[in-house]
Amino acid sequence: MEEKALKSNYMETGKAEAPRQLHPGRMLGWSQDGAGVEVQSENGVRLRISVLEEAILRFRFAPEGRFPDDFSYAVDPNRVWPAPEPRCREEGDGVLIETEALIVKVGALDLRIRICDRAGKVLSEDEKGFHWEPHQTYGGEIVYNSRLVQSGECYYGLGDKSCALDMRGRRLQIWGSDTYGYNEHSDPLYKNIPFFLGVHQGRCYGMLFDNSFRSFFDFGQERSQVMSFFAHGGEMDYYFFGGDSPLEVIASYARLTGRPGLPPLWALGYHQCKWTYDSEEIVRTLAARLREERMPCEAIYLDIEYMDGFRCFTWDRQRFPNPPALLRDLREAGFRVVVIIDPGIRIDPDYAVWRDGWEQDVYCRRGDGPLFKGSVWPGPCHFPDFTRPAVRDWWARQFQGLLQESGVAGIWNDMNEPAVFEEGTFPRDVRHDYDGHPCSHRRGHNVYGSQMVRASLEGIRRFLPDRRPFNITRSGYAGFQRDACTWTGDNVASWAHLRLANIQCQRLACSGVSFCGSDVGGFLERPDGELFVRWMQLAAFHPLFRNHSSGDHGDQEPWSFGEPYTSLAREAIELRCRLLPYFYTAFRDHVETGRPVLRSLVCVDHADPETHRRADEFMVGDDLLVCPVLEKGQSGRPVYLPRGAWYDFWTGVHFEGGTEVWVNTPLARIPLFVREGAVVPLWPVRQHTDEEPVSTVTLRLYPGREMRESVLYEDAGEGMGYREGDWTLRRFRLAPAGEAMQLRQVRDGAFRSPVQRFLVEWAGGSASGQGCLADGHAVKVEEGLEGGFRVELDPGFREAVWRV
């Protein structure tokens, strides 16, 4: 891959001979300043190593001895690092740098780096390491890093890539692109997340290459025993994350790049969207039909047709004559409205937004000074430079009408790769401020979408200050999860894309973006009833659950395929409704710790090689294992259960893990398993989350051989009170106790929960004549799930014991 990139560079220069690759020279010396270590080489190269935490290190190389300003859009600007001092000493032919978690050896010959765990086992090491060459066309350097592939190593991450979950043997690039109707071979796609996870021999690590120029990752395609990453500009600046498990590594990456706030509860419900909801009459009819069909739904989206001639921040007053009244009526019926926004501002002197932007000089300019002009849906447009703080403030101000006056609840940011019709994106000479670090589009392209959604989020916070923001984006750079959720772009109604949706959402979660989903059923073309139902079943377990289609090939609402598909689609939505407290609790864990909501099996048990290349199965939170049906007419399929023990959610049948089991998969059922020892909370089905407070919560117990703790998180579901302590966390500890089973509850927090009773179900086993004692008092036992039992408990109980 490096050779091909070099050839491309040579072709641009028109020179007969290629420039020589350059490498650091022999080490001249090193010095330590607190948590930082700097190494100098005889040809002027400097290496700076910074310890952020014991297991998070940063490596920066300066080929000519001068480091640029320390600025990054990826890194959370509010994070304060402990920066422990490492222990450093010269050893043999280099310098050794040790923390409590990692050992780094920098070689004296050419500054090659080896990183080991505390036991001295190699996690990752350089092949050539850092090297570079002058960029003959644009100046600066093309910077490279090549590393040895470890025995059995697998690679995961890089955002929404559509290839196999394990990227070993693949070559991929980071350059956000509007890839309409992509397939498993398409690259690049919409997101720009240069973070990957490496797993080998029971060990794991992560790396973030924080460089927003067009960059490339070769996971052993060009040379099978070498992986490399490089960029066509900027510096070699990367972070290394150690950890005992993939979940720990991903959590460390989330601490560096930032975690989102807790989403509003309604955002985790079912959402309905289609390109052709293009009039008030159609939207009102849709909302009425959703309620008539008893299809629980939280949000309706409006695509570009709601605008006046596709002008952002406007309404088409013929199609939508009274937006405030429409949105008020929808809100009373339990629907929030989310509207699309694109970055292109139509060039029109009579258009107040464009005129104000022109007067405020917010638009991107070409290298020689004129405003950049590109065509998107409105026609010729100018585009704000979102990398400038004043422009982000200007953009945020534009939302007042939509949010405060019309009643819009959320913003959908689209076309922000950025995409234009002429050349796909902006020309390379377009200029950006880059927050005081002026640059061309070569550097600004990959961060454009992130800075747009950052500005949109500021608008939501400004005009809906008492609500939790809902902000969704198609594109973004590492760290955009701080500001928005996402979906996987313009997919296709096919079984192949159902499989891609499963892989892409797992990959995004591994890349720090848990709040993600796909266009259910496919944006392009139209599924049949079977494919639609299977997609609904899968998406019921994706954090963002949105049915979206172009409408060009027919309707795709949940009732569009007739029976039995209508009822089965409803059942999938209702299952999500019942599991909302589990999802909400998993999101609270994600917000607090950075651990992903969705988890590939390799993240669950990376020490088991069987998990390394399995992509069908995945987990939601700590206890639910899902395996979607991904083939037409599949009435049964194998499911790999990780080590441990598991229960079938539907039947209560118990299985030992570490093996494949065969599961019958009639169209009405998606394979779903629960980890032994779990307590799973379930809510009653509601048509929307504001319908009525939940007074009864079902706790389904899955008894195990050891004590396990499960958590139920509660708060108001909206507003910022949770940040001030207005929440409740219930810890349920289920454990065997001799010939009995014991459930204990410990409750923290000040939130006044509406829950008035728990219905406790036992999954498996039989009801005992000894009954149940709750806080020392006998409680009536009734027959429950598959021969198990059910009891009613006061929500304040501390201990319940059953004879088994």
Image (spheres, rainbow, N blue to C red):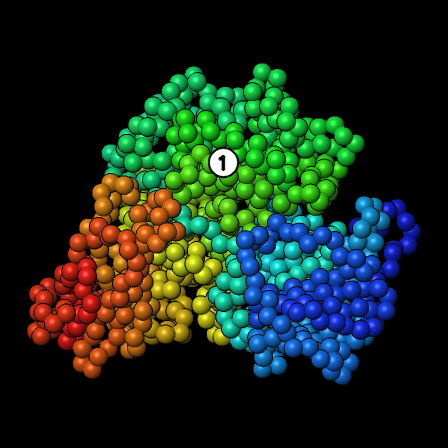
Horizontal and vertical percent position of residue 303: 46, 31
Residue drawn at x 24%, y 40% is: 691
Quarter-wise, where is residue 98 in the image? bottom right
Q: Out of 622 and 440, give the one closest to the viewer.
A: 440
Could you say which quadrant of the image residue 746 lies in? Answer: bottom left
List x then y, in percent, for residue 769.
8, 73
Q: Quarter holding the C terminus?
A: bottom left
- Residue at position x 70%, y 49% in the image: 213
> Dot 1 surroundings within 10 Å: few (below 14), some, or many (20 or more)?
many
Question: Vertical placement of 336 versus 652: above or below?
Answer: above
**441 lies left or right of 745:** right
Which amino acid is tagged 1? Gly
Quarter location, residue 40 = bottom right
Residue in view at x 38 percent, y 40 percent = 466
In the displayed orientation, state which residue is furthest to the front: 34
**Quadrant showing the N terminus:** bottom right
Work out whether residue 491 or residue 433 is closer to the camera in this orientation and state it.
Answer: 433
Horizontal and vertical percent position of residue 68: 74, 53
Q: Callout 1: helix, strand or loop? A: helix
Q: Which residue is mark 1?
A: 459
Whether residue 688 is visible to the viewer of this picture, yes or no, is yes
Is there any visible trace of residue 555 in the rendered image? no
Q: Is residue 502 left or right of residue 192?
A: left
Instruction: Decide which of 560, 213 is in the foreground and name it.
Output: 213
Residue 119 in the image, given as x and y percentages of width and height:
58, 82
Number of numbered markers: 1
